[in-house]
């Protein structure tokens, strides 16, 4: 479920990207909300679909996305917006309670989230292909030597892979001699010790199970 909301006033937030988690009203769904006026504030007319009308109040513009949202998808558009404006958003940032919705849009995309089985990483397409001017991007792409710390299936990884795909084309000259500048990709911070330990343990378990595959025993969690 994806919601776009236009407000009559600017609501300041600590960060432009934020997460909803463990709200009973979400019925098991998780969500994010992005302050588009902070992320794309250099072109407000684009966010609002054109120049302002006389006396028109323009404030924050939000993109709210929900995942594992089958339980809330049946809600009406009005109920979804009301849930956001009366419960979820004010719980995150109290100033949202004083804002008025100028316009809104709700879309539903059943079955749109990608699910990959453990062990399927090697079957994903590479970022760099054998064709000089063809690259792949998306959270499902293997980035090879350009691999990033954001390894999960997420918007962050999709964004980084898009930057790396464009950088690859620029490095290879596929964009022309006037488009060779590459975009900086900021690395994430190092993993915490418990994450490093868990990854090492998982690797040992997987290596111990690998000989069983030669006997035709397939790991049950791989579909």
Image (cartoon, rainbow, N blue to C red):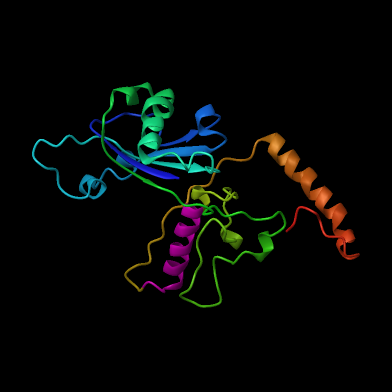
Res. 147 image quadrant: bottom right
Residue in the image at 64% along x and 55% along y: 116
Against 26, residue 170 (above or below) is below
- Secondary structure mostly seen in magenta is helix
Res. 56 image quadrant: top left
Residue in the image at 47% along x and 66% along y: 168
Q: Would residue 142 be counted in the magenta stretch?
A: no
Res. 100 image quadrant: top left
Q: Is residue 23 visible?
A: no
Where is residue 214? Give x, y as percent: 88, 65
Magenta region, residue range: 158-175
Where is residue 176? Give x, y as percent: 35, 74
Q: Where's the N terminus, which quadrant?
A: top left
Q: Which of the two residues, 222 or 14, is positioned nearer the viewer here?
A: 222
Against 161, residue 11 (above or below) is above
Residue in the image at 74% along x and 40% along y: 198
Q: 62 left or right of 161?
A: left
Count of numbered circles in the view: 0
The single residue placed furthest to the right in the displayed view is 215
The single residue placed furthest to the left in the displayed view is 54
Residue in the image at 27% along x and 43% along y: 41
Where is residue 22? Give x, y as percent: 56, 29
């Amino acid at each position: 479920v994806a919601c776009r909301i236009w407000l009559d006033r600017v609501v300041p937030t600590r960060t432009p990207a934020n997460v909803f988690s463990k709200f009973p009203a979400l019925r098991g769904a998780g969500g994010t909300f992005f302050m588009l006026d902070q992320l794309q504030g250099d072109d407000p007319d684009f966010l609002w679909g054109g120049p302002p009308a006389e006396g028109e109040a323009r404030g924050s513009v939000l993109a709210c996305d929900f995942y594992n949202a089958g339980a809330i998808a049946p809600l009406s558009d009005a109920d979804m917006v009301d849930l956001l404006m009366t419960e979820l958003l004010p719980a995150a940032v109290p100033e949202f309670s004083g804002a008025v919705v100028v316009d809104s849009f709700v879309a539903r995309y059943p079955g749109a989230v990608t699910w990959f089985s453990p062990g399927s990483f090697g079957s994903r397409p590479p970022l760099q292909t054998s064709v000089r001017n063809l690259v792949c991007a998306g959270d499902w792409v293997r980035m090879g030597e350009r691999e990033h710390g954001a390894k999960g299936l997420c918007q962050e990884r999709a964004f980084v892979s898009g930057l790396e795909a464009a950088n690859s084309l620029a490095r290879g000259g596929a964009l022309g001699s006037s488009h060779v500048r590459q975009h900086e990709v900021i690395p994430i911070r190092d993993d915490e010790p418990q994450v490093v330990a868990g990854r090492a343990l998982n690797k040992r378990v997987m290596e111990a199970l690998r000989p069983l595959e030669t006997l035709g025993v397939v790991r049950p969690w791989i579909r």
